[in-house]
Image: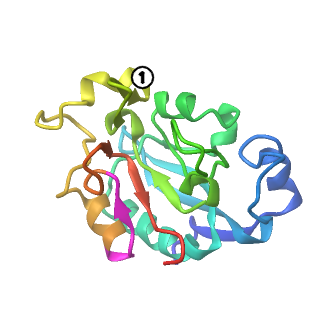
């Protein structure tokens, strides 16, 4: 294993960073179910950067393998920071093109706990790969500053499509991609495993 990659349990020091932010007071996921990942990635300048994720222990090894392969292939990911650096505000994190995983929250415009709330979903380069849904006749695009990347027929850097290395590597590990799962919404940044898989 590359020495820049490791997995650990959530110790007191890490918990202090997420307590009351991504790990909210009403969080129903035991800390024992979560893992901290330190990993390497290539940023948009092609330089090696260190990233941090918190995920469900069920996918920790898979994510480590995926990110090792992305790093080996020089796949560009601008930043991978704990969403707690954005006070667990998903919109702020996405606007800053931060790739992240665990955040105990609800699915946008629903009362269902998001798979991010269980640490079972990862968003990659979200600014360039928005979430798009129509609610009550109004189109929702998140993050709000990603409108120019809504049209997926256009070519632009960092666009995730069905031929993207991310899609292939996540699929090899049993993940689904939000870019081709649903007819009524698209979530091009979003890779996830279904509960119970």
Q: Secondary structure at mark 1?
A: helix
In depth, the one of 90 and 85 nearer the eye is 90
Figure colour scheme: rainbow
Residue highlighted by disc 1: 144
Q: Is residue 130 above or below residue 138?
A: below
* Residue 33, quarter of the rendered image: bottom right
* Residue 125, quarter of the rendered image: top left
In depth, the one of 83 and 72 nearer the eye is 83
**Is residue 175 highlighted in magenta?**
yes
Residue in view at x 50 percent, y 58 percent: 121
From the top left corner, tell me how far across and down residue 191 is, in percent: 41, 58
- Taking the view exactly as shown, the residue that stands out farthest to the right is 12
Q: Is residue 5 above or below residue 144?
A: below
For the residue carrying disc 1, how many other residues have a C-alpha within 10 Å: few (<14), some (14-19), or many (20+)?
Answer: some
From the top left corner, tell me how far across and down residue 18 is, in percent: 77, 47
Report the number of discs: 1
Q: Is residue 7 above or below residue 116?
A: below
Residue in view at x 54 percent, y 48 percent: 100
Q: Which residues are magenta?
A: 172-178
């Amino acid at each position: 294993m590359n020495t820049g990659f490791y997995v650990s349990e959530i110790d007191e020091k890490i918990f202090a960073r997420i307590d009351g932010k991504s790990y909210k007071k009403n969080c129903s996921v035991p800390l024992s179910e979560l893992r901290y990942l330190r990993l390497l990635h290539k940023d948009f300048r092609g330089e090696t950067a260190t990233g941090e994720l918190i995920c469900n222990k069920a996918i920790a090894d898979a994510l480590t393998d995926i990110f090792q392969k992305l790093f080996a292939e020089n796949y560009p990911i601008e930043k991978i920071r704990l969403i707690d650096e954005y006070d667990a505000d998903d919109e702020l994190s996405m606007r800053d093109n931060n790739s992240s995983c665990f955040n105990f929250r609800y699915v946008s415009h629903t009362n269902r706990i998001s798979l991010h709330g269980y640490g079972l979903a990862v968003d990659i380069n979200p600014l360039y790969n928005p979430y798009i849904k129509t609610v009550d006749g109004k189109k929702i695009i998140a993050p709000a500053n990603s409108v120019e990347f809504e049209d997926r027929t256009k070519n632009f850097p960092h666009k995730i499509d069905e031929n993207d290395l991310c899609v292939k590597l996540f699929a090899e590990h049993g993940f689904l991609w939000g870019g081709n799962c649903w007819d009524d919404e698209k979530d091009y940044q979003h890779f996830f495993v279904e509960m119970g898989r």
